[in-house]
Image (cartoon, rainbow, N blue to C red):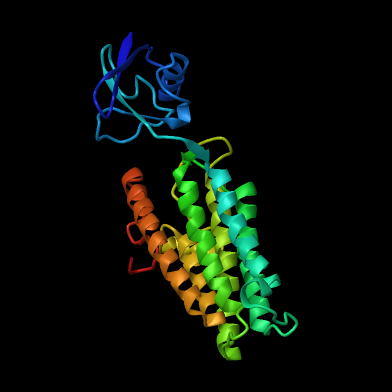
Amino acid sequence: MEIVIRSAKSSMLIANVNVNANTTIGEIKKKLYDLGKAPYAARQNLKLDVKGITLSDSETVKSLSLKAGSILYYKDLGPQIGWKTVFLMEYAGPLIVYLWLYQRPWLFYGNVETDNYHYVVNFAAGCWTVHYAKRLYETLFVHRFSHATMPLRNLFKNCSYYWLFTMYVAYHVNHPLYTAPCWGKFYTGAAVFALCELGNLCVHLALRDLRPPGTTVRKIPMPTNLFTGLFRYVSCPNYTYEIGSWIGFTVMTSCLPAGLFAIAGAYQMAVWALGKHKAYKKEFPSYPKNRKAIIPFIL
């Protein structure tokens, strides 16, 4: 039988595609590409109606109750780039930029002595390095992506956010006139940073174990150890720990730009967490009702 593919923008006919009950959306995308009617599959978006949800590549003609003459609406998502590539570029930039400014301060401040760095400045560089080295490690060996690609434009947006904020924070923390906080603030912030980094890693490992390699399986995340125990209270403890890390870094350095970076990140992660929390509740009828999205008992 044949189904009809129309443009989501203009309803113009794109193609008639031969399918059977077991044909998947992914296979329909390949047929459109082979017919020369659409670009590569990762760039295609197919929906049952113009304002409907995006159809998963694994869904079949039968599961969608499509019949001869049924219509699917096509949209070109634009140039795509791999999630892993974007993450690697996002996180390698802050690591390089911060250490570049830390090791070569004369490029920004003129002739200054690097041997006289306060221990807080040295420790802050170490913490920044650990954080982004961990992110690179997780991108390569821990994270399992449910989507292979994202729009290419996101690369420039995301890299600009991370790289420019890194330069803003590094410029102030490594400045010759930087004033370090008292030892109490430093040790408190450093302890919070270290604990939250470890917690974030533990949550990412727990999330990886929920999804077998090569699949898009989704399960309800549950506590597995002390650090993942935060799953009892929030849907996205990885974001909770991430915010905690940057709060710790801000306290440790007493640097206003670091605080602004923490606030900007917290806002964006709260948006993501609320979206994921809503999706969990919609997908799993038995999802724990006492969980919040990102802040226990509050949000």
Left or right: residue 136 versus residue 268 is right
Q: How many marks?
A: 0
Left or right: residue 50 versus residue 97 is left
Image location (x, y in percent) of residue 134? 63, 59
Q: Residue at x 47, y 15 (%)?
A: 34
Quadrant where the N terminus is found in the figure: top left
Q: Residue furthest top?
A: 1
Residue 174 image-quadrant placement:
bottom right
Q: Nearer the viewer, residue 2 or 16?
A: 16
Q: Residue at x 36, y 55 (%)?
A: 288
Q: Residue at x 45, y 47 (%)?
A: 154
Residue 112 image-quadrant placement:
bottom right
Q: Nearer the viewer, residue 103 or 298?
A: 103
Image location (x, y in percent) of residue 279? 35, 47
Q: Residue at x 64, y 82 (%)?
A: 120
Residue 109 seen from this side: yes
Q: Is residue 112 above or below residue 277?
A: below
Left or right: residue 108 versus residue 217 is right
Image location (x, y in percent) of residue 83? 53, 43
Quadrant where the C terminus is found in the figure: bottom left
Q: Residue furthest front?
A: 110
